[in-house]
Image: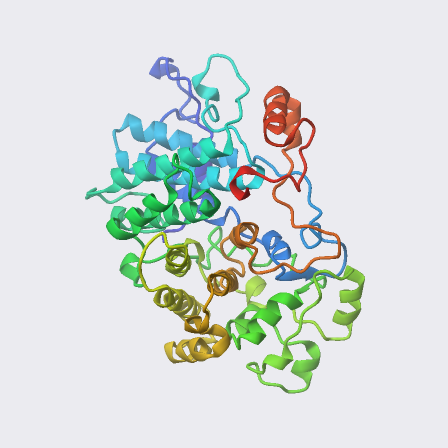
Amino acid sequence: MKKLIYSLLAGVLLMSSCKDQDLMNIDPNKPTQTHPQLLLTKIEWDTFRAYSGTSPLYATRMLVQTDGESEGQYFKWGRGDFAPYSSLRNVTKMIEEAGRINDNSYIALAKFFRAYYFYNLTLTFGDIPYNQALKGEDQAGYMPPVYDSQKTVFQGILKELDEANNMLKGLNVIIAGDIIYKGDAAKWRRLVNSFRLKVLMTLSKKESDNDLKVKETFAQIVQSEPILGNTEADGDGQLIFLDQEGNRYPEFNSSGFGSGMFMASTFIEHLQNRKDPRLFLYCTQTKIGKEAGKPINDFTSYEGGDPAAPYAETSIKAAAGKVSKVNDRFPSNPTNEPLVLMGYSEQEFIIAEGIVRNWISGDANQHYKNGVKASFKFYQTYVKGYEAYLTEEKANDYLALPVNNFALSTTTAQKMEQIITQKYLRTFFQSGWSAFYDNLRTGYPEFRRPAGVTVPNRWIYPQSEYDNNRDNVSKAIETQFGAGNDKINQQVWWVK
């Protein structure tokens, strides 16, 4: 990965749209045209980091806060934001510039990035502006965009991903500016198709919808399209970090890993119960465990705080040295492991679930094992100092334990729980809110919470929409939930 030159990109992203001016009158410091490769680098950097951070880890019962009440930990959040639309403006500009030079490779990638952002936006809120979004520069006067139904948005997402796959098919070009796959269109095609599987599995509750053709499309992709593999040649869509200014791991030197952030007991117990060595690289031993001289692979030397308890209660426990913190490597290592937007491990769990749901035929146990082994291999490759705990032999021993042995599951519910739980265990600082949405969709793993508290289904629309697009957002709320019911516990279409 070449060093990203953001000073140049900043100028690119502030381009004017004054297309009809005489060239002699254009300010050379405000370019109206550029090669889309300059936009692609910035788009990739932003997109692969877009949903990283600690916020999802509180909601998915991986972290607890001890110096104040975390809204995510107690499921008390309110408004979301439309910040992804700002990133989508850059994608729109890349489409425009790619069209100008007649280069479909950038248009194909733009369709993927559009699908990715709209997928996360609609899961966040429900209905969102889609068909009329991002049209400001094309219109003589600003027209507030109408909201599309969530079903319409998902149909659009799947259509754009299908188009991206077809546009990348047979392309024999190097896509300049690509810091993910070094310009390899064939690898991007695999990523696009694997992400299609993820979107389709998200719609598992809509498998009987004839308009969506969820099961049929899922089967066609698995059987006929290239998808991710377990080698570097056909592997994960991931952003690798370098120890260079502007290229470091996003949590490096973060002040958030201070005295108030600790591990949640439910997450640690999931790992302890399964004798899962990923525990050692996710978090630290408790102060008491370390001072007792226990080795790093002693599972009893790890403990978390109760995510359903008042934060002051966990604070007392932490002060006594009985709660593990996040592994020091996250804020202290400038590179750490890559951030994976979509990877082979997640894909294999999705395929295993598809087999259990009878969408396709195959060996669910083998795909389940592929997913676990790929996660172990990922950390063995990128996290230094823990390699001995993550070898293929260790992975096989792990899978042989009765609690991890998929072959011992006899009911559909047991199989689903095993797949989704293993999918969850690989998401520490990975995959954004995916584990949260899987819980909404399947109920697994169960999220411990205070009595009387339910897991929210969505976020409230941004205040800016009420200020600038009130009629359309109000209509969207009324259509989905009833007038005035823009609330976090309202059930959205995709989970009904």
Q: In this rendering, is residue 399 above or below 449?
A: below
Tell me if I can see residue 38 in this picture. no
| Residue 153 at least partly seen | yes
Looking at the figure, which quarter contains the C terminus? top right
Compared to 324, does 40 lie above or below? above
Residue at 66% over, 65% down: 264
| 28 in relation to 390, above or below | above
Residue 233 as seen in the image, left or right of residue 285: left
- Of residue 231 and residue 16, the one placed in the foreground of this image is 231
Residue 35's x, y, as percent? 32, 33
- In the rendered image, residue 122, in percent from the top left (x then y), is placed at 52, 37
Colour setting = rainbow
Q: Looking at the image, which residue sits at the far bottom?
A: 293
**Which quadrant of the view contains residue 366?**
bottom left
The residue at the point 57 percent across, 38 percent down is: 492
Of residues 390 and 184, the one nearer the viewer is 390
Quarter holding residue 170: top left
Left or right: residue 403 versus residue 94 is: right
Q: Position of residue 452 (x, y in %)?
A: 75, 52
Q: Is residue 429 left or right of residue 188?
A: right
The total of numbered circles placed on residues is 0
Tell me which residue sits at (66%, 42%) in the image: 489
